[in-house]
Image: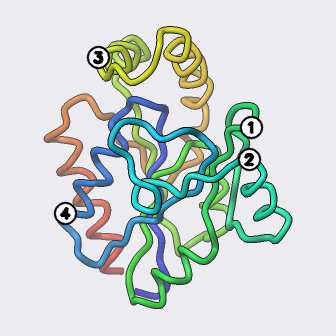
Amino acid sequence: MNNKVIIFSAPSGSGKTTLVKHCLQIFPQLQFSVSATTRALRGEEIHGKDYFFLSVEEFKKLISEDAFVEFEEVYTDKFYGTLKSEVERTWSEGKVVIFDVDVVGGVNLKKKFGEKALSIFIAPPSIDELERRLISRATDDLETIKTRVAKAKHEMSYAEEFDEIVINDDLKTSKKEIERLVEKFIEN
């Protein structure tokens, strides 16, 4: 597998996490990279499985120790990052790392890993549809949704920096496209 990584990025609500979970079910050679974050747990999330939930102080300490492949302060004191130890652990098991990261993180990871990486941007069919999905998800208040939609408009400008763009209009079609892209990358 030669220490490969697959990067999924998208504006919040585009269906990225659903597509990553689908890949993990289809391809046993993939291993999800658990990111670190300073945001609070949501719903049924589990520390160490969905994210490593850290305090701002813990996160900043790890930054000073150069423990991240990449990290970003997405909102004030809301950090997300990829721990080097997670990537190395996965490669030591002979697996391909699969990332579910924000758009800037995805661009940074692609720059870091170059040809060892397949970067896929999951785009919503439209900003209006994205807003509808975020509202129906019912995990955020209206103010947070407005912030996410505004951020999504900006994030869409990064799409061309990814190897592939998949517009998630129909989930079944998107899953088939993702399967094709991942299989081709893993086999090369």
What label sits on residue 56 in the rendered view? Answer: 2
User: Is residue 137 placed above or below 63 in the rendered structure?
Assistant: above
Within-10-Å neighbours for mark 1: few <14, some 14–19, many 20+: some
Q: CA distance from mark 2 to mark 3?
A: 30 Å
Front residue of 40 and 121: 40
Say whether disc 3 or disc 4 marks the residue closer to the N-terminus: 4
1 and 2 marks in contact (CB < 8 Å): yes
Within-10-Å neighbours for mark 4: few <14, some 14–19, many 20+: few
Say whether disc 2 or disc 3 marks the residue closer to the N-terminus: 2
Where's the C terminus, which quadrant? bottom left
Task: Name the amino acid, label 1.
Answer: Asp
Say whether disc 4 or disc 2 marks the residue closer to the N-terminus: 4
What label sits on residue 77 in the rendered view? Answer: 1
Q: CA distance from mark 1 to mark 2?
A: 6 Å
Task: Name the amino acid, label 3.
Answer: Ser
What label sits on residue 25 in the rendered view? Answer: 4
Say whether disc 1 or disc 3 marks the residue closer to the N-terminus: 1
**Residue 111 point in image, percent of width and height:** 67, 62
Say whether disc 1 or disc 4 marks the residue closer to the N-terminus: 4
Q: CA distance from mark 4 to mark 2?
A: 33 Å
Front residue of 110 and 83: 83
Q: CA distance from mark 1 to mark 4?
A: 33 Å
The image quadrant that residue 157 belongs to is: top right
Q: Residue at x 20, y 48 (%)?
A: 175
What label sits on residue 136 in the rendered view? Answer: 3
Q: Is residue 140 left or right of residue 115?
A: left
Q: Residue at x 47, y 13 (%)?
A: 141
Q: Secondary structure at mark 4?
A: helix
Task: Name the amino acid, label 2.
Answer: Val
